[in-house]
Amino acid sequence: MPIFKKSFISLLLLAYMPVLIFLSIGFFYTTQTRYFIKEIVEFFLFSTVVYAFGIILFRGVLRISWCYFSISFLFLISFLKTAFYYLYQSKVTISAFYILFETTGSESSQFLATFFDLKLFIISIVFILFLLLTFKQLNYVYEKERILFYLPKFNLLGTGVYLVLLIGILSSIYLINWKLKHNNILYIAKDAYITYNEAQALFQTNLVNQRNEQLQNVTSLDEPQTYVIIIGESTSSRNMGLYGYYRDTNPLLSEIKDELLVFNDVIAPHTHTIPSLNKVLSLSNYENPDVIHCGSVVQLANAAGFSTFWISNQQPIGIHETLVTAISKATKEQFFTNALTNKQTEYDEMLLPFIEQVLDKKDSKKILFVHLYGTHISYKFSYPPSFQKFTDNPITKFPSARSREEINHYDNAILYNDFIVRSIINQVKKRNENAFVIYFSDHGDEVFQDMDFVGHNEYHATKPMFEIPFIVWTSEKFRQSFSNFEKLKSYQNRKYMLDDFIHSFSDLSQINFNQFQPERSIFNAFFKERKRMIRKEVDYDTR
Ligand SMILES: [Zn+2]
């Protein structure tokens, strides 16, 4: 009987090995103990449900098979959770799943390459070793104490045990559902998948058409106009020389500073491409998040009689396609430079000949949307070797070999981005037309500024992830024809969140429509500063 008891205890220990290993490694990387305890409790309850379920349903060989399956499954979850704590010091979140949904194959592998460092490799080996060890011990207990896998017996006492197990399952599920579901990986995955798909279905039916019936009474000037909207990627204004960064990462834009309106206090509505551009490019905003399908900037431009073009250096294929390309499909013509080659990434200069070609077109009113690859992670792949200017030790609160390398790559990528944005401005400028160029980024990245971290993540939501450049270049002709142009200069310190971009866009393009709200346009005299709410009810400016 003592041996039997010992086997039972070691079986319990083996069953909860995934929880224990997560507890012992994750503990070192957690910053908020309270949340970590919730994680552990949820994982413990979830494991209990999985095992209790197997004990009730299966006996003997089937039960040991179930044990092997469950342990592998729970080890996998444990590894994911641990990896997230190691990489992000946070739990797995919906926005983490967005990363998976929004990146294409090559981006994901680059993403993994950035994060899969030596320590994570060692953690993976530890997990594999522990899994094998757990299997070996489980087999040992099974060989020695097979009776354990046939318990409880079908008698009165046994019925009692089954009842206890059933109550255990139900109360665990109740507890998880009541207070802990946001720690449950299956719930998070399901939630992310459903919301993502619902949104995509709406986009595919409403946003791909050239016109949208929700946009009414659209009027605009009847004269030649050329407007360019450059959508950047993962570029934080925090690392831009033009915004006061100590390194001169914007020599070319700084050179023409007098021709630019540099808005100093603009933030992205989210820290990920898809949720952010959802709002930036459509009528949707924080107050009304569910009206994305009611009209995009592209559809507005179409209705105003502009010929619209989409020129992108981001991958058109993969899951990524669903959102941004849905909006882009409403343009008259699309060019995807990245689709032309088999290379993983093309530098953004690939876009320039396409932009030239479109600017040459005879359409008198045209709007170009240019989607950059920008300063996407892995930073070292987003700029050519000739832009490797910053190689010394950067200033950071978090000095390490890794931060040094990442900051330098990021700053070099921003330097290259400076060249790209300036080149596009030059292309427009030399034509001497009635024109403007707007440049902004979809969100920023944290690169060891406020936190010992690289990348973007809505859980941490540090300021550099939100702080984005918002820059306007205008041509001589535009300045002359736009009424009260000089006034715009006094608006450069306005606090603005880019989910209202459609109103600013229509204002500067002098497109009027039924849903235009002047108080939401950064260019308007009637602009009203509003609370900049991020995540769920967090005031960005006072948090
Ligand atoms: Zn992005």
Image (spheres, rainbow, N blue to C red):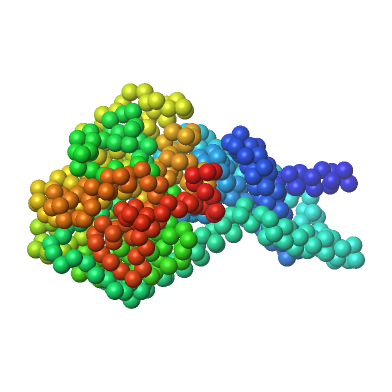
Residue positioned 26% across, 29% down in the render: 389
Residue 267 placement (x, y as % from top left): 40, 47
Residue 420 placement (x, y as % from top left): 22, 43
Q: Nearer the viewer, residue 217 or 466?
A: 217
Name the image quarter holding the C terminus.
top right
Residue positioned 20% across, 39% down in the render: 258
Q: Is residue 282 above or below residue 372?
A: below
Residue 54 placement (x, y as % from top left): 71, 61
> Going by the picture, which residue comes out furthest to the right?
156
Residue positioned 23% across, 35% down in the render: 254
Residue positioned 35% across, 60% down in the render: 518
Q: Is residue 51 left or right of residue 155?
A: left
Q: Is residue 339 left or right of residue 264?
A: left
Q: Is any atom of residue 501 visible in this view?
A: no
Q: Nearer the viewer, residue 120 or 278?
A: 278
> Going by the picture, which residue comes out furthest to the bottom?
213
Q: Is residue 501 above or below residue 473?
A: below
Q: Nearer the viewer, residue 340 or 424?
A: 424
Residue 252 placement (x, y as % from top left): 20, 36
Q: How many marks?
A: 0
Q: Nearer the viewer, residue 6 or 311?
A: 311
Q: Is any atom of residue 538 visible in this view?
A: yes
Q: Is residue 251 left or right of residue 148?
A: left
Image quadrant assignment for residue 407: top left
